[in-house]
Image (cartoon, helix red, strand yellow):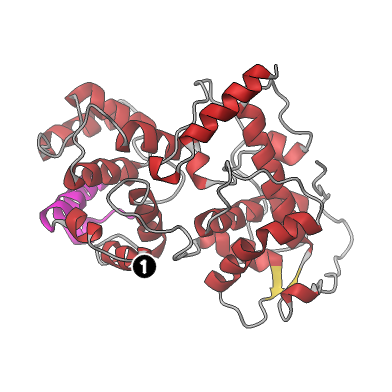
Amino acid sequence: MDLPVMVRPTAEFVPPAPIVLRHLAPAKVSEVYESYWRFAAERQAVFFRRARGEMRPWTDNPVLAIYKFTNAYRASDRVSQYLIRHVIYRDDLPKSPPEVFFRILLFKLFNKIETWELLERALGPITFDDYRFAAYDSVLVRAMHAGRRIYSAAYIMPPGSRAFGRSAKHQNHLLLLERMMADRLAERLAQTRTMQEGFEKLRAYPTIGDFLAYQFITDINYSELTDFSEMDFVVPGPGARDGLRKCFVDPGGLNEPELIRLMADLQEQEFERLGLDFRSLWGRRLQLIDCQNLFCEVDKYARVAHPQIAGKTGRVRIKQKFEPTPEPFELFYPPKWNLNDKIHVDALRRAATG
């Protein structure tokens, strides 16, 4: 699939007139709006090519081939897949709400697979029942002294020194988790009726802003602790806001969450209008969290494909290059989504047809 790849203009750039699509009126869009849908379709196609075990190249689009982008579906990303399969749905670990919540938050505070595996190697099975601050602190301090990074670069975790008084960031985050456990937050979340209510409970804690609270409630919702629809609620992050600005010249009176919902509502119509063959996640439509993430990714994509269209931050480069991971590509989604049997049947069908 050919996605637009533009070169940076040498002459003074004159912005094009806004694109008016009648079905979006009164909102007005830029050329990045169509790239949003083309990007989503091609990124999902890359996902399925990799899942089928095809060899590289997985795309002929130079931007997607060179730079790192997340999947069209958040739950398909490597870290989310690890969280779902190896942290949440573990037959060898306790399944009580407090224990599952503890594992999810411990993993997500660092958001790094290697840190979770480091703790498991050093301490054995990760359970709140066996949790001791000093033991966890010691493992993490030794790792940092050895030059290892214990936090992911995917998003910035506030240090929490003002709230918890420790000089080391990880110590404050362990104390934050201890406070959540003491407050019986897992049980309180299990009683919430909406994703927004769960978000607000997380948002009330020190160092947890809007972006992190939304990410955390989404991750918790992969478990059996809650069962919210991912179409309930959305909070755009900083990157998504940049993507929204690049796609919508005039939002037509809609706020950012409303624009994201508009994209979710229009997805089938827009893929068809643009002649795009978008293969959903075994029948699961793009959810609000996915459409939000796609705005973040198209913000990055547009830095190369549409350099003349600026976002709020003014960033002009994509930092991370694409490097495929060597691990086997095995997919597993929250069982309540009813996708895993479909994946198995699909794999058998592919094997049968060669």
Which quadrant holds residue 233? bottom left
Secondary element type, mark 1? helix
Q: Position of residue 214 (x, y in %)?
A: 40, 59
- Quarter of the image that includes the N terminus: top right
- Residue 280 is situated, as x and y percent measured from the top left of the image, at 62, 45
Numbered circles on residues, count: 1
Q: On the picture, is 87 further left or further right than 177?
A: right
Magenta residue check for 234: no
The answer to whether residue 306 shows anywhere in this view is: no
| Magenta residues (range) | 158-183
Q: Main secondary structure of the magenta part?
A: helix
Q: Residue at x 51, y 61 (%)?
A: 238
In front: 269, or 188? Answer: 269
> Taking the image as drawn, is residue 236 in sight?
yes
Residue named by callout 1: 196
Residue 313 figure quarter: bottom right
Q: Is residue 126 above or below residue 104?
A: above
The crowding category of the residue bearing disc 1, from other C-alpha atoms within 10 Å (few below 14, some 14 to 19, many at least 20), is some
296 relative to 153, above or below: below
Q: Is residue 180 magenta?
A: yes
Residue 100 drawn at (x, y percent):
24, 42
At 49% across and 21% down in the image, what residue appears? 327
User: Of all residues shown, which one is farthest toward the right?
Assistant: 11
Query: Is residue 101 depicted above or below 309 in this figure?
Result: above
Measured as percent of width and height from the top left, residue 54 is found at: 67, 22
Locate the C terminus and report the quarter of the image it occupies: top right
Amino acid tagged 1 = Gln
> Which residue is found at the position 18% from the left and 43% from the top?
96
Q: Is residue 219 left or right of residue 291?
A: left
